[in-house]
Image (tube, rainbow, N blue to C red):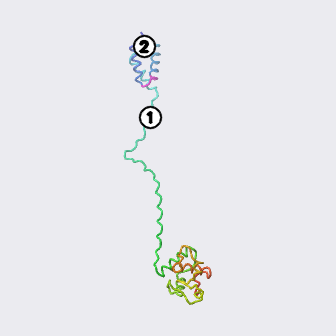
Amino acid sequence: MTALSDPARRSRVVAAARTAGTAALALGVFGSLITAAGAASGDVKPTSLQQTIAAAVRAAPAVQAAPAAPAVPANEQPAPAVVAPAPAPMPAPAPAPVYADNLDGWIRQALDIMAQHGIPGSYDGIMRNIQRESSGNPQAINLYDSNAAMGIPSKGLLQVIDPTFNAYHVEGTSTNIWDPVANIVAACNYAAHRYGSMDNVSSAY
């Protein structure tokens, strides 16, 4: 009886081949044993069988283990999310200027209005003409000159007659000729058109 004709011994051979790890290795060992059995008439010795299996295992290619994923340190924190900066708040509007209710305040307010409308004139030039025309009295009126004789007396800080005030009134100011700011702005607007600026006026105009 040959070595592989014995069912029990053949089972041991196949079981030994399976321990190598794969079905392909078992088939290779099985083929090697069949060849050895055909060439020999005696029983296969256990030591020869063990040597055959060991040789087959050495010849089989080594199975490469998959690379392990890199370890993440336990104390490593995730990168912070990038947050777009909030838009800068709009600047608060500048507070409206407050003017004193006196000659100084009237002139300063008139100058700001004149600047908005491109009307030339300086604080000193306005003050100088006011002092000459009315001595700073917003209720001053001339009832004795030629204008008064024609029924249109000069009025206010810069002694403006009604037709001139109406013709050179600046939008945004009072329409009342006695209003000190409106009176100054209208008079300076007239002087700018006729003399280039109130600064150029040094006598009755």
Taking 85 as reference, is 43 above or below it?
above
Residue at screen point 46% across, 57% down:
86
Taking 29 as reference, is 199 above or below it?
below
Q: Which residues are magenta?
A: 21-25
Residue bearing the label numbered 2: 4
Taking the magenta stretch, the answer to whether it contains residue 161 is: no
The amino acid at mark 2 is Leu
Q: At which x and y percent is residue 5? A: 42, 11
Tag 1 secondary structure: loop
Q: Quadrant of residue 150?
A: bottom right
Residue at screen point 47% across, 71% down:
96
Q: At which x and y percent is residue 191? A: 59, 81
First along the sequence among labels 2 and 1 = 2
Can the viewer see residue 18? yes
Residue at the left extreme, as displayed: 75
Q: Main secondary structure of the magenta part?
A: helix
Name the mark nearer the viewer: 2 or 1.
1
- Tags 2 and 1 touching, CB below 8 Å: no
Tag 2 secondary structure: loop
Residue bearing the label numbered 1: 66
Q: At which x and y percent is residue 84? A: 47, 54
Q: At which x and y percent is residue 195? A: 61, 82
Quadrant containing the C terminus is bottom right
Closest to the observer: 68 or 141? 141
Taking 204 as reference, is 175 above or below it?
above
Residue at the bottom extreme, as displayed: 144
